Amino acid sequence: MAKINKILIANRGEIAVRIIRTCREMGITSVAVFSEVDKKALHVKLADEAYFIGPSPPLESYLNIDKIISVAKKCRANAIHPGYGFLAENSLFVKRCEEEGIIFIGPPSEPMEIMGKKTLSRKKMLEAGVPIIPGTVEPVKNEEDLLETAKKIGFPLLLKASAGGGGKGMRLVRDEDELLSAYQLAKSEACSSFGDDSIYIEKYIERPHHIEIQILADQHGNCIYLGERECSIQRRYQKVLEETPSPLLDDDTRRAMGEVAVKAAKAVGYTNAGTVEFVVDEDKNFYFLEMNTRLQVEHPITEMVTGIDIVKEQIKIASGEKLSFNQSDINPIGASIECRIYAEDPDNNFLPSTGTIVYYQAPEGGLGVRLDSGVYQGYKVPMEYDPIIAKLITWGRTREEAIYRMLRALSEYQIVGIKTTIPFFKRILLHPKFYSGKYNTHFISELEKKREENQEEKKIALITAGIKDYLEKKISSQTEKKTSLSNWKFYGRLKNFSNRF
């Protein structure tokens, strides 16, 4: 068993801050790394030690394996925690850590590599008896193979990047006419995002739910699941709000999914924390989607209902310790919701909003409120990185209590100087479909479509009111009478007026 005494956190922002806090609770020295633009970042201020690793572009700093390893050796950190994003699922980075004798707080390189290749992981799951979405287990070879395979699977279908995630290199194809152009776009995006343009095909599940199971596996053969997270509130395949438990699942389905997730992890020799993701249809049939071989952005809601610090367990597992609890010890209590607060303008097509935070007032806390934040008043939000600035999490004895507690916390959360998605979450939480729990992955796209239609209706109403006002004033000035037009006269003249354009 290797004692971990100093951890380098190969990340930034709110996740680096969150890991630093657990290190402090465990008496472990924390080491931050930072780029040029992150010199005054919160994670740099809070860490015990901090080291500069280069210019702002990620390839020259947070994605530079040589620089990260060099700093770890220089400061004598005997472990590295990758957080999520950047190098978190890079098996080459894990191999390098293994070669250098540095403990990687995550899975070994081999299971990470298997699960990182979507077609290979689907093949492994099929062999292990884990249900997968109908589709290919090998990348599409060429356009001829694409057409032949698509016809066998049937439309609608999804084209997906073999090395992908986060919606990159993914295209929904509803009929044969769209197939070729969608394939070319998916290949191009996959190549630019992952350096691998291979594409595979999956049958598209109509009105799907995206539900994931959190697992923990030690190096002694023990593996358990910590319940599920409902992740169907997505915008362009990116999760923005998560909750646990899922409003869709019953206890039997929940248990069956948990057992399958454990089977999936064991099939590839997985250890440490990981998440097995499933697509679930309206009849609660579930299919393996992929495995995220890292800590998830939404892990705090699982921590809130189980009372287990997942980062702490990651560190213990990486040290060689056995899990200190069994499956029978896991009894989630209550409900929890997480809102990912992004520096984006929800009223302007979610464009990134950078600049200085001139005023910052965090929620006042209270029972069941948690904030994982990487910003402060006076902090300048950079444009070089992912726009997530904080995660607001609430817990309640019931789902209803968790929702109202979140609404209260959002109303107290004040950020001035940049635009954020806080107002957007209020709209979601107050929507009848969300409140009833009867939603799927199409929820946000339908919400945005409705909002666009309403905006058009408002625009037409304003134009109509303006024209009516103009015509009334014109008639009034001609007759010197201030009588308003009747509706039938108005619309008749409006028609004549519009015909001039």
Image: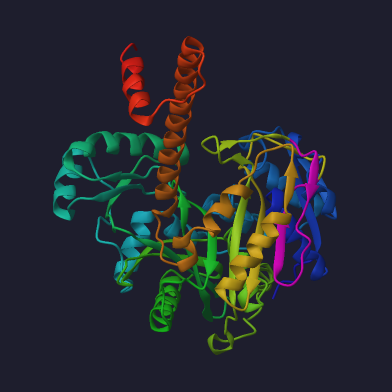
Q: Nearer the viewer, residue 426 or 177?
A: 426
Regarding residue 195, the answer to whether it shows in the image is no
Asked where in the image residue 185 lies, by quadrant, the reply is top left
From the viewer's perspective, is 341 left or right of 281? right
Asked where in the image residue 315 lies, by quadrant, the reply is bottom right
Range of the magenta residues?
356-376
Q: Nearer the viewer, residue 120 or 295?
A: 295
| Membership of 380 in magenta stretch | no
Asked where in the image residue 117 lies, by quadrant, the reply is bottom left
Say if 284 sits above or below 391 in the image.
Answer: below
| Membership of 361 in magenta stretch | yes
Say if 467 sits above or below 42 in the image.
Answer: above
At 55% across and 38% down in the image, what residue appears?
347
x and y, in percent, of residue 410 in the image: 67, 56
At 51% across and 76% down in the image, what residue appears?
227
x and y, in percent, of residue 462 in the image: 48, 29
